[in-house]
Image (cartoon, rainbow, N blue to C red):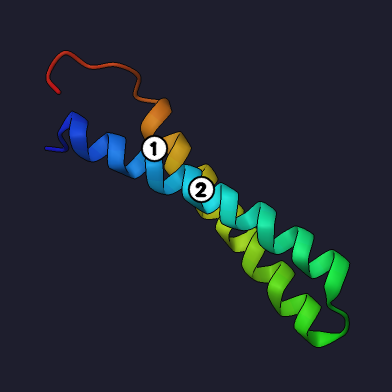
Amino acid sequence: MVSALDMMWLSFLGIFLMFVSAITALFGREKLSGFIRFIVLSFSFTCLVVAGLIVLFVVVPGPRADL
C-alpha cells in the first residue's frame, strides 16, 4: 500500500523531472550540435516521458480515503 506521503514525494520527483527536461532541452537546442545534441535531447525526452508516467500514476487514481 502506498501512503499519501509517498505519493507526494513521487509527485515532487515528477515535477523535478519536468524541470530537468525543460532545462536540458533548452541547453541542447541553444548550445550544442551534432551527436551530443541528440544525446541531450533524447535524455530530455526520456525525462519528460517518465515524468508524464509519474503524473498519470499519481493523478489518475484521484483522492482516496484509504491513504
Quadrant occupied by the N terminus: top left
- Residue at image point 38% right, 38% down: 11
SS at badge 2: helix
Question: In the shown orientation, is residue 19 left or right of residue 59?
Answer: right
Label 2, label 1: how far apart the Cα atoms are: 10 Å
Q: Quadrant of residue 30?
A: bottom right
Q: Which residue occupies the extreme bottom position in the image?
A: 35
Q: Secondary structure at mark 1?
A: helix
- Determine crowd level at label 1: few under 14, some 14-19, many 20+ residues with C-alpha closer than 10 A: some
**Is residue 2 or residue 18 the one in the foreground?**
18
Q: Quadrant of the C terminus?
A: top left
**Residue beneath label 1, please?**
57
Query: Quadrant location of residue 31?
Result: bottom right
Kind of residue indicated by mark 1: Phe
Q: Earlier in the sequence, mark 2 or mark 1?
A: 2
Task: Identify the residue under disc 2.
Answer: 51
Q: Is residue 42 above or below residue 22?
A: below
Q: Position of residue 13 (x, y in %)?
A: 40, 48
